Structures are given as structure tokens and as C-alpha cells.
Amino acid sequence: MSDLDLKNLPEREEEIDFSDIYEKHQINVEDDLDTIIVVDGAPIVDEAKEEKLRTVLTKLFTKNAGEIKENGIWMPMAPNASGKRESKGFLFIDFETPEAAHAAIKNLDGHKMSKSHQLSVNRFSDVEKYATMSDEYVPPVQEEFKPKEHLKSWLMDPQARDQFFVYHGNDAGIYWNRKSEKPEEVYSRRDWTQGYLQWSPLGSYIATFHSQGIALWGGPSWAQIVRFYHPGVRLIDFSPNERYLVTWSTEPINLSRIPANTRHPFSDYDEGNQTIVWDIKTGALLRTFPSTQSESQQKTVRWPMFKWSPSDKYFARVVPGQQLSVYEAPSMTLLDKKSIKIDGIVDFEWSPALGGKADPKLNQKEEVLSYWTPEVGNQPARVTIMAMPSKEIVRTKNLFNVTECSLYWQSQGYFLAVKVNRHTKTKKSQFTNLEIFRMCEKAIPVETLEIKDPVLKFAWEPNGERFATISTNDPAYGAAPNQSGAAAPTTIKTAITFYYLDTSKAVAGFRPLKKIEKKTANNFAWSPKGRHIVLATIRSPSSHDIEFWDLDFEPAAGSSLSEAAKKEGKKEVDSIQLLATQEHYGVTDIEWDPTGRYVASGSSAWHHSVDHGFAIWDFKGQQLIQENIDNFKLLQWRPRPKTLLSDEQKKKIRKNLRQYSKIFDEEDLAAGDANAAKLIAARRKAVEEWYAWRKQAEKQMLEERKAAGKELRSTQDDGKSETIEEWVEEVIDEVEEIVD
């Protein structure tokens, strides 16, 4: 229109050229509308409360999404039936960035402002898209069904073997355990992980660590199932039922440092956070959390940062000294929208019991957790048991002269043991008390056990009413470096004590069952099935003992142990029996397999510079295999999920165990014969190769002598000589044992 000729004006409006105006005032619809969202379901208010609602919504969306443009909230108002102006229940919000608008949809769609107001958040550009949709239904294109691999296929192994992974150098592999034979490789890969491997709690997945995040693998082919983008990840934790994964990174999320073409799930809301909760099945990011620790406390990380309830419905963390924050899953929101203020809180633990009618022995309607607070001013230290989600206080116990507390739940939630490290009034020495809460009894009585010496380790027997402790009265324990600056010795004398619940008296109580003194054991591991326990001196420069104990030992009638007991006038043989004492040089780790049949001991390169490798033992302490592997780092048994057998089916199996044992013995014998046949065949082949080589060498030697004119005289054989091959098989050792 700049070249408008007034003498030749267009006769019709359609002939007017507006192109220069359009070009000057062109609007990029896609760019401008990406920052606008539509919020429906907001409270309907009149003009008097309009500003207050704007303030609430501004605060809500700014906190959970990002910055809003100036005057970026438009809330339509219209007269109602009485003539007063009021809002219509929906509004428009214009953010500074498209990322903030995306975060608002992700974090606040479905958010409940009150019991009767739930927000529905959508993109403004979606309104036009859905408005112009065709009324004619077009069926979606169905993709070809591709069945997924069974994540628990290894449980179908006909021989009921267990798997474990071995990580050494840059190599990692998964193997079948084959008793005394060399483990059978299932899958191996070089540079599979960049730092660590970890099984999920039920054994469905194996997690590998990478610079850009975590990957989960599984199934018979060990294909990658899902990956989680979290740069610099260092720690992970699974929920008990494998529904969620928590990851922690040393690097706070920084959107500006993520490469432009990299797909990632983060928004402005996640900026600066270090901890992420993921949905394992979908791979979706559910929520990120900032660190609660001050700068001075960030040298060490409290892990797991979040602790899960046994049902996966709740997870919680402590803000040390201030509060306990309990969140609901999968919404990832605070329970009742607020944390529980608890002055001085130090730590907490969830009970493994599900509550409700899951266990008739427990009078427990909800899931419960326990926490402890130290002495503050005139207030004593206190242990508290709280029910969730009602937050009802179930039981408390006051404690005095407390240095530190540790909480230990029995595997079924029947007992809670609190290890209380106490000091004398002069604070020059320490001792330990055990406060045991009996959760199955009315009013939850608490029993106190006084132990004169500091307790270094405590553990309940799985699914049992016994527990074990390691204590010491060695003066070297806790000794400061000497004048020359040398550190105190790391191997100290210890005592191991086993306790049981004595129900023979009117008032039941825990009593010492046996005390084993003058040992150097600093660690123990209960069998997952109970009864057996392994004592070990790990990560010690001077002692490497491993002891195998049976707490329900029953010698056969007429055996040497039974006869010795009779001579001593004992009616019963001591039920606690040392089965074997072994040594594994440089042992750093002890781990039972999930069936309680085998124990693995390892010497890791993470703790020693030489003699790396692992050994596998049976529960009696007999060494089955030993592998010396350079730069060996870790061996971990694959966990098993809980059995699906009912109590009646288990009872039937125990009743017919001898019949099953015969079948297993025959299979073991057949496998042994097959292995022996392979060995004999290999030896026979080696002998035949030797004779063939010898004949060839003799023939070559005769030809060389003949060529040199030194041919040997041939002796006449009148047919009376013959060659006899004699095979001698010698049985070195044979042991036959029937295990009930």
C-alpha cells in the first residue's frame, strides 16, 4: 500500500493489497501459544475474592512450574443470576518459557486445591486441535503384538539353581551356580557398567551405572528394558516391590548444561535437584527432590535417602533435627500436604509388616514406622512407634544417658529392637542396652537387656525369635592413635552371643542361649532361612577366619557327639554346634544365596591390592569352588521373590521330603556319573593321542636313521608277543551323606 495511486483506487475490497501490513504485524502462532495454558476447575469467586485467588494461583504455579509473565493471568469474570460479577471457574496463564508451561501441565494437572476443586491443566494450542477434530471415528493402526520376555524365567530352571553376577576389571558376567563344578556362564559383557551393578529386590532386573544414567536389564536375552537419564548418578535404591527407583547424583540438575539435541524429562521445576523418583515400568520421571543437607553435611550422604514402606504406598525421609516427611505413591505428594514436625529427630525405620489382616498375630491395622529423638535440654531421648497414614502414636519409650540409638525390626514385624549406646555419668566409658518392643502383645510391652560391653553388631534371625550380637571389651576398641601417630589395631577381640525368647516362665523374656568368647569375628551373616549363621573376620590385615555354625544341631543317635554327651551325663546335646572353621585370605565380603544352601566369600580389589577372587561354600562349611580372579570386585547372588506355595503345600513337601531326596540323589548321581564319564573319555583320548604321536615319532626316527645309514636290526617276531593295555581306576575318596 506504500505505492498507493489515489487516481486508480481499487473498486472492490478484495482487490486491496494488505501484504505489507500482514508482514509488519505477523504473529508466529506456534511460538506465542506454547507458553499459554488453560486451567479449568478453579474455585468460582466474586470480585471481592478475585485478587486473593490470583495470589494463591500465582504462588502455586510459580512454585511448581516457573515464572509467569507480568499480568500473565487472565481470569474471565461475568455477571451471575443476581447481577454480581464472578469468575467462571477457568483461567489462562502465560509463562515466560514453554518449558515452564510444560512443567505446569506435568506437575499440576489433577492437583486438588480442596475437596471439591481439582485442577485440569492443558495447553492452549490443544483447545483448537480438539475443537477441529473430525466427528468421524478413525480406528487407530494396530501394531503387531510382540510378546515381552519373562523377567522371572530363571526360576523355571529344572535343577532349581541360583544365579549370581561377578564383576571384575571392566568385565561383568552372570552365572549359574553348579555346586562343586565351575559356574556356567549365562551372559557376559565387557564395559557393561561404568562403576557398579545391583540386583533389584526380587531379582527381576539388574541395574548398570553409566555417566548419563541408569539402565535396567533382564529376561533370558538380557536385553535393555528401560533407562533413566540422570547425569552423574552415583546411588540408587529400589522400592521393596520393584515399582519405583530412586536415583541420586552428585551433579544438581542444570538444564543449561544438557546438550541441545538430548532428550530429557526435566523442566524448570527440577532445576538444582539431585534426587529423582522414577516409575520402573513406564520409565517416567515422577518427581525430583532437592537435598536437605547443609553445605557442611554434604561430605557424606545419608543413603537410602528415602525409605519405603513394605507396600510401596509410602516413602519418607528425615530432615535431621526438624521433621519427618512422608510422601504418597504414585502421586508423590506429602501425606496430608504437610511434614510431621519432630524436634531433634535423627533416624527412622519402617516395620516390614503390611498391617491390616495380612498377619493375624499382629494387632496392627496400618503400616507403622519407628523413630528416635536424642536428649534435648530436660527432655529425655525417646523412641516412638507411629502408624501410617493416620499418624497415630502407638507406643513411646523414654531413654536416659543416650549417646546413639539404632533401630532393628524383626523380618515379620513381630519385634522391634533398639540398640541404645549409653554412657556413664562421667562419660568415660560406654555400654549397651537393648530395648525390645513386642508388637504382637497387648499394649506392646518393652523388655530391657543390659549388656556391660559396647555392642558392635546386631541382627535378628530371619523369620525367627532369636538374635545375635557382637560385643567387645578389648581396650584397643576405640583407642586413639598413639604418640607416634600410628592408628589403633583394626583386629580386636570380640564375643558373639545368641539370644532366644524363653517362654517357659510366666513372663516370657529373652535369655542368652550361648556366648562365644575370645574371637576376632567382626561380622556375621544369618542364612535367609534361619538356623545357620556364618561368623567372619572381614577386611582385617591379620585374621581371615570364617566359621560356620548351626543353632539347631541334632546329632544322629549313636554318633560320637551323642555318645560323648551321655558320658558327661547330659540329657541333651548342645544345640549350637560349630560345623567348620575355614580361612579365606583377604576376605572382605560374605553373602548367602537366597535358598540358604550356599555362602560366597570374596576378596575385593576395592579393599585389597592382591589375592583377589571368590570362594563358594556349602552351609556346612565345605569349600565347593575357589576362583582367583585378578581385579575381582564384587559377587552378588540373584534374589528370589517370595514363594507362591501355601502353608499346606509347604507342610506336604516337608512330610514327603525323603521321597524328594531320593529323586534328587538319583539326579546328583547321574550328573556325577556323566561327569566321571566325560573325565574318563578325556583321559582315554589323551592316551590315544599320545600313542599316535609316539608311533609317528618312531616312524620318523627310523626314516632318519635309514637315511643316515644307521638302520636298526629288525628282530624276528614269531607271533608269541602281544601288547597289553591295563587301565587302573582308583577311588581316592567317597562320601555318602543323607540330608534330611
Image: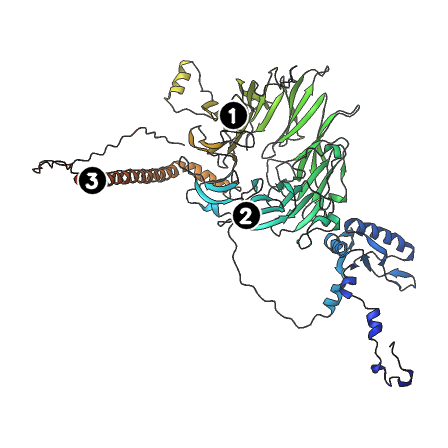
**Where residue 632 appears, x then y in whole percent?**
51, 35
Bin the neighbour count of mark 2 within 10 Å (Cα to Cα): few under 14, some 14-19, many 20 and up: some
Q: Mark 3 highlights which residue?
A: 704
Q: Mark 1 highlights which residue?
A: 535
**Where residue 654 appears, x then y in whole percent?**
44, 36
Q: Is residue 32 above or below residue 458?
A: below
Bin the neighbour count of mark 3 within 10 Å (Cα to Cα): few under 14, some 14-19, many 20 and up: few
Contact between labelled residues 3 and 2, with CB atoms less than 8 Å apart = no
Instruction: Tell me the element at label 3.
Output: helix
Residue type beneath disc 2: Trp
Cα gap from disc 1 to disc 2, whole angstroms: 34 Å
Residue type beneath disc 3: Glu
Q: How is the image coloured?
A: rainbow
Q: Is residue 436 above or below residue 308?
A: above
Q: Which mark is residue 217?
A: 2
Q: Nearer the viewer, mark 2 or mark 3?
A: 3
